[in-house]
Image (cartoon, grey):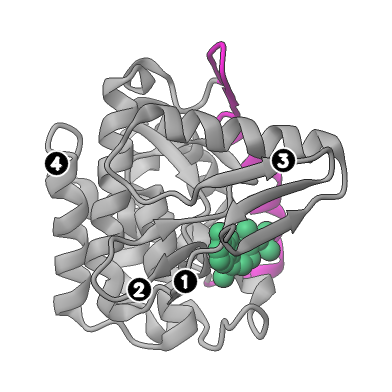
């Protein structure tokens, strides 16, 4: 009997080609991370093995963070460590867009509608986007909890290969924390700690004492970028209502890059 399929349809063959290149490159890294088996592709579809399981939840965060950390560690060992987060990464197999360029305009647009008093100013956004060039680089594959399928007694499986860019280490961890909290509510501090530790353990050479500052700021980036989807995709809680650290820490962290540059 052939396995059940998850068929994803695309708006153009070019989108299929892009997602296919991302998937193949991730698979070729050989990281110890769950990925679905690709059964077939057509000009308009990718057809994966159907993975049983549910979207990641609070209790899965450490295991998911660990998988993301392992993926980055392997990718870095296989050449990604030489990339610069703010310059395109081009190999014979894949092209990964830079971190800052494609995000800059959208972040400033969203910042403009937030109004005064928001933790991230235009200056802080600009300074942190530029600062990313100096930070250890990783991949960014949308780390919302629906892009991770979890079943009992099995490692999490990462799905959705449509977008893949460069980003500083920790950027996807911030997305995972923000979107899980926006979906399910408060994140207990113990779980946050375990999640950060699980990720850091897989990336011992890249995360130092400043990681909390960076994580705090990237979380606010994701807050801005995800706020328009509040009320959709299961996002029920605005990040400021469930943020697991004080707003004062955010203001302090946001100013750090400006002071350092
Ligand atoms: N291989 C798969 N097996 C089972 N379910 C899947 C698979 N891939 C994706 N899904 C489910 O379908 C949802 C949508 O797929 P995804 O590729 O994330 O598309 P979208 O671009 O809409 O986010 C996922 O959140 C996940 O729940
Ligand atoms: Mg998805």
* Comparing labels 4 and 1, the label whose residue is closer to the camera: 1
Q: Which residue is mark 1?
A: 52
Query: Could you say which quadrant of the image residue 137 lies in?
Result: top left
Query: Could you say which quadrant of the image residue 13 lies in?
Result: top right
Q: Taking 17 as reference, is 172 left or right? A: left
Where is residue 54 drawn, in percent x and y? 45, 77
Q: Tell me the element at label 2.
A: loop
Q: CA distance from mark 4 to mark 1?
A: 37 Å
Where is residue 56 drawn, in percent x and y? 40, 73
Labels 1 and 3 touching (C-beta < 8 A): no
Labels 2 and 1 touching (C-beta < 8 A): yes
* Comparing labels 3 and 4, the label whose residue is closer to the camera: 3
Q: Which residue is mark 3?
A: 41
Identify the disc placed on residue 151. 2
Query: Assess mark 1: CB under 8 A from ligand 1?
Result: yes
Q: Which residues are magenta?
A: 88-117
Q: Taking 120 as reference, is 68 left or right? A: left
Mark 4 or mark 1: name the one nearer the start of the chain. Answer: 1
């Amino acid at each position: 009997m052939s396995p059940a399929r998850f068929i994803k349809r695309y708006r153009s063959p070019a989108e299929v080609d892009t997602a296919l290149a991302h998937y193949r490159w991730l698979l070729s890294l050989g990281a110890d991370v769950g990925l679905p088996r690709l059964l077939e592709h057509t000009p308009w579809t990718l057809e994966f093995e159907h993975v049983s399981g549910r979207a990641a939840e609070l209790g899965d965060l450490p295991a998911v963070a660990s998988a993301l950390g392992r993926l980055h560690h392997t990718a870095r060992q296989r050449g990604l460590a030489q990339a610069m987060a703010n310059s395109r990464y081009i190999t014979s197999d894949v092209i990964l867009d830079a971190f800052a360029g494609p995000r800059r305009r959208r972040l400033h647009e969203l910042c403009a509608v937030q109004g005064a008093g928001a933790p991230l100013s235009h200056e802080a956004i600009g300074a942190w986007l530029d600062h990313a060039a100096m930070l250890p680089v990783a991949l960014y594959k949308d780390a919302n909890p629906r892009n991770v399928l979890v079943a009992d007694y099995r490692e999490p499986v990462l799905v959705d290969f449509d977008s893949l860019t460069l980003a500083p280490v920790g950027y996807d961890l911030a997305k995972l924390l923000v979107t899980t909290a926006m979906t399910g509510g408060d994140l207990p501090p113990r779980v946050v700690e375990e999640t950060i530790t699980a990720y850091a353990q897989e990336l011992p050479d890249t995360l130092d004492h400043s990681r909390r500052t960076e994580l705090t700021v990237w979380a606010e980036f994701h807050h801005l970028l995800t706020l328009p989807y509040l009320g959709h995709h299961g996002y029920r809680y605005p990040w400021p209502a469930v943020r697991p650290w004080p707003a004062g820490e955010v203001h302090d962290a946001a100013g750090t890059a400006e002071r350092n540059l």
